[in-house]
Image (spheres, rainbow, N blue to C red):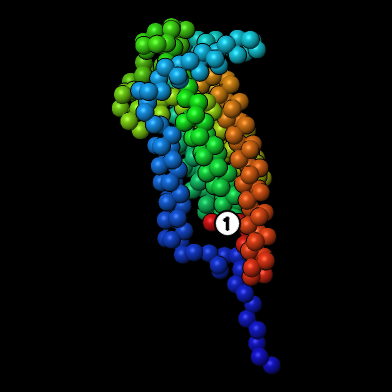
Amino acid sequence: MASVTAPKTGQNQRRPLWLDISFEIGIVLLVYLAYSWSRGSLHAKAATAFQHARQIIDIEKMLGILVEPRIQSFFLAESYRTHLANALYTVGYYPSLVLFAVWAYWRHRDKYMRIRTAFVISAVLAFAVFALYPMAPPRFFDGGHAGAEDLGFVDTLVTQWHVKESLAQAFYNPYAAMPSCHFAWGLMIGIALWWMTKSAGGRTIGLLLPLATFVGITSTANHFILDALGGTAVTVLSLMLAAFVSRAWAKRTAGVGGVTPTNPG
């Protein structure tokens, strides 16, 4: 009787490691290109960005949640608190993203694919808002920026860590406060950690990271509370869309070859 070779599934169908990693790096580069496009002409956006920030301030005043000045005042009271605020803001962004991506890729590859898809979707959504609704962060309302009144905010990264704003603006969009990608991605990492691991340590980090990120973005005057709420909405929508894409891909591949990879990519 002739033997029948079963179709290869799962790990056997994966691309070579070097090609897979190159694919992931390519996605990162495409996301950065999209981000660069969303920057547009920063000079032309300035007046509109300050106007939108005042709208957010007025809404928070109406809702009684304009407490960012009080949050920052607490951290400005002691030098070590200010350094802590800067550290929370810094570590809660790119370092956390990189560490999470490397860990998830090696330990939970299939789940990583879905979360990566959610990150890409969230980036597209956020960058579109940046282009259509540019908004200045609270730290611009420090009395040192033309067109923005002094509301008592302090740019702690400049005053304490001496970050050169002019140099940093060559690589980021200063009018991308709404929604807060900083908080959106910290929250997404937290949710992903709860999904991917059952360890007490992993889930504790998943709980604390979004909280620490929220403290970091508000205490350094980089985001308003409504920016974080906007980031939350982006995270929830992105996770829902990523789940839809994953299910649609599974159905498509099952119909084509009878083999159901767990995720696209």
In the figure, 136 relative to 194: above or below? above
Question: How many numbered circles does the render carry?
Answer: 1
Compare residues 251 and 82 and report the one nearer the observer.
251
Residue 164 position within the rendered picture, expressed as x and y whole percent measured from the top left: 31, 23
User: Residue at the spot x=47%, y=7% of the render?
Assistant: 151
Is residue 41 shown left or right of residue 129?
left
> In the rendered image, which quarter contains the C terminus?
bottom right
User: Residue at the spot x=36%, y=28% of the render?
Assistant: 41
User: Residue at the spot x=44%, y=40% of the render?
Assistant: 34
Residue 166 position within the rendered picture, expressed as x and y whole percent measured from the top left: 31, 24
Compare residues 213 and 260 and report the one nearer the observer.
260
Compare residues 50 and 198 and report the one nearer the observer.
50
SS category of the residue bearing label 1: loop
User: Residue at the spot x=61%, y=68% of the render?
Assistant: 9
Residue 55 position within the rendered picture, expressed as x and y whole percent measured from the top left: 54, 15
Residue 212 position within the rendered picture, expressed as x and y whole percent measured from the top left: 55, 27
User: What is the three-letter code of the residue carrying label 1?
Assistant: Pro
Is residue 160 shown left or right of residue 224?
left
In the figure, 71 relative to 35: above or below? above
Q: Is residue 78 at all visible to an observer of this figure?
A: no
> In the rendered image, which quarter contains the N terminus?
bottom right
> Residue 263 falls in which quadrant of the image?
bottom right
Residue underneath mark 1: 264
Q: Is residue 131 at all visible to an observer of this figure?
A: yes
User: Label 1 neighbourhood size at 10 Å, few (<14), some (14-19), many (20+)?
Assistant: some
